[in-house]
Amino acid sequence: MKKDYSLLLELINAFGVSGKEMAVREIITKNIKGHVDNIHVDKLGNLIGHKKGKRSKIMLAAHMDEIGLMVKNIEKDGKIRISKIGGIEDAVLLNEKVHIRTRKGIIPGVVTTDSILTSQKPADHYAIGDMFIDTGLGREELFKEAVHIGSFISFVPNAEIIANGKIISGKALDDRVGCYILIELIKQLTKTKDEIFFVFTVQEEVGLYGAKTSSYLIEPDWAIAVDVTNCDDMLSNPSKVLGGGPTITIKDEQMISNPCIDEWLLNIAKKKNIPIQPDVSEGGTTDALTISLSKGGVPTAVVGVPIRNLHTTLSLASIADIERAILLLRELLKNPPEVCPI
């Protein structure tokens, strides 16, 4: 029977720019209620689902937030100047459809420039300062619709399953894919010997903030961040391939993963014939960084799913990689080692 991925599509399409993750949190809460012993939302907005146990305290984290924009200024003619939230290349933004979130609802618009708007010869390069959002409304109309400086802006929902059911595409795969994996683990792990905290974090894209506060609160014995990583399989010498299996990040730009947890994961993958892609990267980092530095330190690793077009308005991931990541983590959490040596 073909699996239903409507929840994954719903998560990807949800409005959840860093600092405005409430809609994503509501979807997750609805789907994990009854599958965990308790649910807690901390002061920063992290959602924590807790399965009780008698052994180690284990934390799994995936971030709810996505890259996006914010209203910086509204000019007399209705041009909305924008500020980036998270790491987005300026060139990615041009001609993209966006949704401005207000207390009255959603205002649609498109990112453009003066020369593109008037069909003049385009410049060789555009920076964020050249761009604005055109909604078709004047400044006073925008004010009436409750658009203001500081309004959050998301890319238009565009999730779909393509390539004969093999690929999921859309905005915000980073990291709604991770959120989906945690939800599936919560549902599939009916019994556990350990205390497992499933943490859906906020504001990862702007500073890994949610993972910092939640790990400080939980004080886990060890942890795994579940995220996505850049896929380069369209290049001549790829290091990660779409459909080649989940990744285990050995090193990224700012941290080295705990070798003990990495070894657990690699051994399980070998035993269960799960294809794995070890990941050594020169760029980026994840919630694992701030978790690992919490209080006296936490042994932490990263399990990821490779995606194409990372930090753009339209990314692609393999459904098989997502399912294999769920299997890998489920096998680990069924009966994990009690001690993680240094």
Image (tube, rainbow, N blue to C red):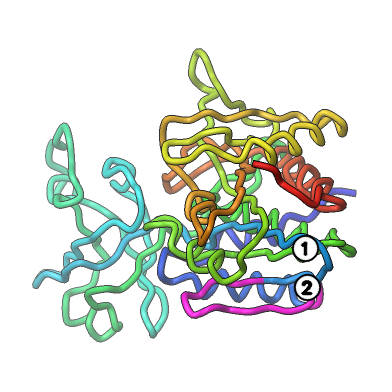
The residue shown at (87%, 51%) is 335
Is 191 in front, or is 311?
191
Residue 58 located within the stretch drawn in magenta: no
In which quadrant will I find the C terminus? top right
- Residue 322, which numbered label? none
Horizontal side of 20 relative to 92 (left or right) equals: right
Q: Earlier in the sequence, mark 2 or mark 1?
A: 2
In this view, which residue lies farthest toward the left? 76
User: Amino acid type of disc 2?
Assistant: Val
Q: Is residue 267 above or below residue 176?
A: above
Residue at 43%, 48% (x, y): give it. Answer: 313
Indicate left or right for 331 with 300 as reference.
right
Work out how far the residue at label 2 is from the one at label 1, CA to CA, in angstroms.
7 Å
Q: Which residue is mark 1?
A: 186
Magenta stretch, overall SS: loop
Mark 2 sits on what residue?
A: 36
- Secondary structure of the residue carrying numbered label 1: helix
Please provide percent x and percent y for residue 34. Answer: 81, 77
Q: Residue 82's quadrant in the figure?
A: bottom left
- In this rendering, the answer to whether 117 lies above or below 280 is below
Which residue is pictured at 76% across the width and 58% down the height?
A: 184
* Amino acid type for the residue under numbered disc 1: Ile
Per the rendered image, the range of residues in magenta is 34-48
For image coordinates 78% across by 55% down, the residue present is 4
In the image shown, does 57 or 201 lie closer to the viewer? 57
Q: In terms of secondary structure, where does tag 2 sit?
A: loop
Measuring from the top left, give residue 21's x and y in whole percent. 49, 70
